Image (cartoon, rainbow, N blue to C red):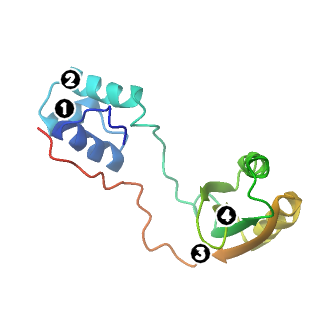
């Protein structure tokens, strides 16, 4: 977290509430926090303006959305030189099925989270899109059998604040 951002206990409580349900109203937040709606609005806007709150979105049920299978793909690049990494990242950014891309340590360079309709669609993704990325030297795919925990709520460490 940016050390220049000064948060108090009320800000932390607001962040907890918004992470749990971003659709809550300022009236609800005001009641839960014990401040006026205007004060709550100003605090939230301040956290948005400084970049602490980056976005709001709806979390979809993947199966109901027709996306029945999730994979993780560990990618090893042929070169660790910046131009190759940049080219890889630019290409990955163009693949809608890749919903997360993490630069990692260990035996690979990147870990991708990929979502697809079914196994056939995933195979097409590998054959038609991933195999054309020349920066990739090796990839290992893993099928997600079930999701045990899928929380988007971050455990924000609250320092001793006033």
Quarter of the image containing the N terminus? top left
Q: Nearer the viewer, mark 4 or mark 1?
A: 4
Q: Earlier in the sequence, mark 4 or mark 2?
A: 2
Q: Residue at x 40, y 25 (%)?
A: 49
Answer few, some or many: residues within 10 Å of disc 1's Cα (few below 14, many 20 plus, some between 14 and 19).
some
- Residue tagged by mark 2? 39
- N-terminal of the pair, mark 1 or mark 2, is 1
For marks 1 and 3, give the CA distance: 40 Å
For label 3, the SS is loop
Element carrying mark 2: helix
Q: Which residue is mark 4?
A: 109
For disc 1, the marked residue is: 30
Question: Is residue 37 left or right of 54 when viewed as pictured?
Answer: left
Q: Nearer the viewer, mark 1 or mark 2?
A: 2
Q: Residues within 10 Å of mark 2 (few under 14, many from 20)?
A: few
How packed mark 3 is, by other alpha carbons closer than 10 Å (few <14, some 14-19, many 20 or more), is: few
What label does residue 144 carry, if any?
3
Secondary structure of the residue carrying numbered label 1: helix
Q: Nearer the viewer, residue 129 or 57?
A: 129
């Amino acid at each position: 977290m940016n050390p220049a951002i000064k948060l108090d206990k009320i800000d932390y409580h607001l962040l907890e509430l918004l992470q749990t349900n971003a659709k809550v109203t300022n009236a609800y937040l005001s009641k839960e926090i014990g401040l006026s709606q205007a004060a709550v609005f100003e605090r939230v806007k301040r956290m948005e303006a400084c970049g602490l709150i980056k976005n709001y979105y709806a979390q979809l049920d993947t199966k109901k959305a027709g996306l029945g299978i999730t994979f993780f793909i560990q990618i090893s690049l042929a070169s660790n030189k910046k131009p190759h990494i940049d080219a890889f990242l630019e290409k990955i950014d163009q693949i809608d099925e890749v919903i997360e891309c993490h630069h990692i340590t260990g035996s690979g360079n990147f870990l991708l989270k990929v979502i697809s309709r079914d196994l056939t669609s995933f195979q097409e993704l590998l054959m038609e899109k991933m195999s054309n990325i020349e920066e990739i030297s090796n990839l290992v795919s893993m099928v997600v059998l079930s999701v045990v925990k899928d929380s988007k709520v971050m455990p924000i460490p609250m320092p001793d604040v006033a």
